[in-house]
Image (cartoon, rainbow, N blue to C red):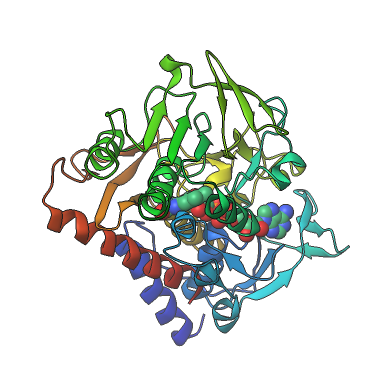
Amino acid sequence: MTNIHRRAFIRAAGGVAALGATIGFPSLALGAARRVVVVGGGVGGSTIAKYLRKLDPTVAVTLIETKPSYTACLMSNEVLSGERTLESLTFGYDGLRRYGVEVVRDTAVGIDPVKKTVQTAGGKGFDYDACVVSPGIGFKWGAIEGYDEEVAETVPHAWNAGPQTQMLRSQIEAMPEGGRVIIVAPPNPFKCPPGPYERASQIAMYCKHHKPGAKIIILDPKDAFSKQGLYVEGWTKLYGYGTDNSMIEWVGAAGGGKVESLDPSTLTIQAEIEEFQGDVVNIIPPQKAGAIAFAADLVDGDWCPVDKRTFESLRHKDIYVLGDASSAAKMPKSAYAANSQAKVAAAAIVSRFHGLEPGDPTFVNTCYSVVGEEFGISVAAVYGLDAGTNTIEPVPNSGGVSPANASPEIRKREVSYAHSWFKNVINDMLE
Ligand SMILES: Cc1cc2nc3c(=O)[nH]c(=O)nc-3n(C[C@H](O)[C@H](O)[C@H](O)COP(=O)(O)OP(=O)(O)OC[C@H]3O[C@@H](n4cnc5c(N)ncnc54)[C@H](O)[C@@H]3O)c2cc1C
């Protein structure tokens, strides 16, 4: 390793250590360049591609991504209120190319863990010394009778930002005055635990100004949800929650919120106790790891088990699984979690390339939700590794949720924190 490369490694590794990932520094010279193939250019994949190059510019990094650009799910609920456009959430990969990442537009269809090759739909094969898989989630189609991929063409899930988000926004805009939006929330675990409730809030924010007689009903198979107390506080203040005229109604498991079927021709939902009919229906289906995780035999059940010290798969050596697809309890499936895991895995991979043992990691997560124009809330935690149980545990007294009944100034400030967090995480991934 040249002095420049050694300095770059130490500088970048210092950044990771500052974020909590404790790693050793290289002391050995490298032989032939090592190759890392990253599958998926979302949060986890983009972050690790960049950080591998920052940690050790001698590592050759290839990123395989199906789409030509990245459209962030983060903040995509704000498209539904008209607060932002999809274009403002869409970013190219030139920033990664500037770090020397080779970005390939293709879809990985298989991984051979013996030959150490990733195969793509385009018929190519990419050899690796380490492979990183961060494909996000897939949907369990058919879990709700009558709701499948074809029906989703007109009854959007909008749980992967893009045309689905735009479709839901257009349907809400076209909804008659006094119309009814039904959101079907998924069971745990799923991508972005506070997301369905932020979605209801953002739709209410729009309706309050443009369709004041509208109602948003959340049908939920769960008895509780992320930041529930703070959401209820915001909904009560802003949307009359708990009164007969509440714009938002939440029906949890105990109230019969579990949905059994959909009749797409009438937008009628059969829930456990009652039938609900909507003018707009948004079903967020139950989830599992993205398809490549199944094709590459990385799953145990719905998700990919990993060694929480490194995020290396417990099923196949030298393959690392990040983000939503991984089984990373007790971290939530969030962008900040994927970003944090990517830095830990980058440090572990480069450490191994240099013959070093990966250190004990620390992870972070913060998740903001915008409940109204000037009403933001958040949850934050720092996590450490319990190597004995291979679990990621919150560090005691390290985080928490925003205070209950906080001043209007604090709530307003959290909205601007949410927006600046979004800019920062995008920069950290892609710039
Ligand atoms: C409405 C909504 C709001 C959200 N808001 C927040 C928020 O405020 N804060 C937060 O922290 N998180 C938020 N999230 C969650 C966050 O988006 C995810 O947790 C995060 O994107 C996970 O990163 P990932 O790398 O696992 O997957 P993704 O970011 O989903 O990336 C997966 C990528 O892999 C690609 N891919 C998949 N399979 C293949 C293949 N075989 N070959 C090539 N490419 C492939 C996909 O095209 C995609 O680009 C939100 C999610 C939603 C739905």
* Residue at the image position 46 percent from the left and 44 percent from the top: 192
Picture coordinates of residue 170, whole percent (x, y): 58, 56
Q: Is residue 357 visible?
A: no
Comparing 179 with 99, the one in front is 179
Residue 111 location in percent, x, y?
A: 76, 51
Corner quadrant of residue 42: bottom right
Q: Relative to 360, is 51 above or below?
A: below
> Residue placed at 63% from the left, 41% from the top?
289
Residue sticking out furthest to the right: 123
Say above or below: 384 vs 358: above
Q: Is residue 385 above or below residue 341?
A: above
The percent position of residue 271, horizontal first and vertical second, equals: 56, 20
Q: In the displayed structure, would residue 224 be above or below residue 60?
A: above
Q: Is residue 412 visible?
A: yes
Front residue of this view, candidates 338 and 172: 172
User: In the figure, residue 101 lies in which quadrant?
Assistant: bottom right
- Expressed as whole percent of the image width and height from the top left, the position of residue 330 reads 40, 36
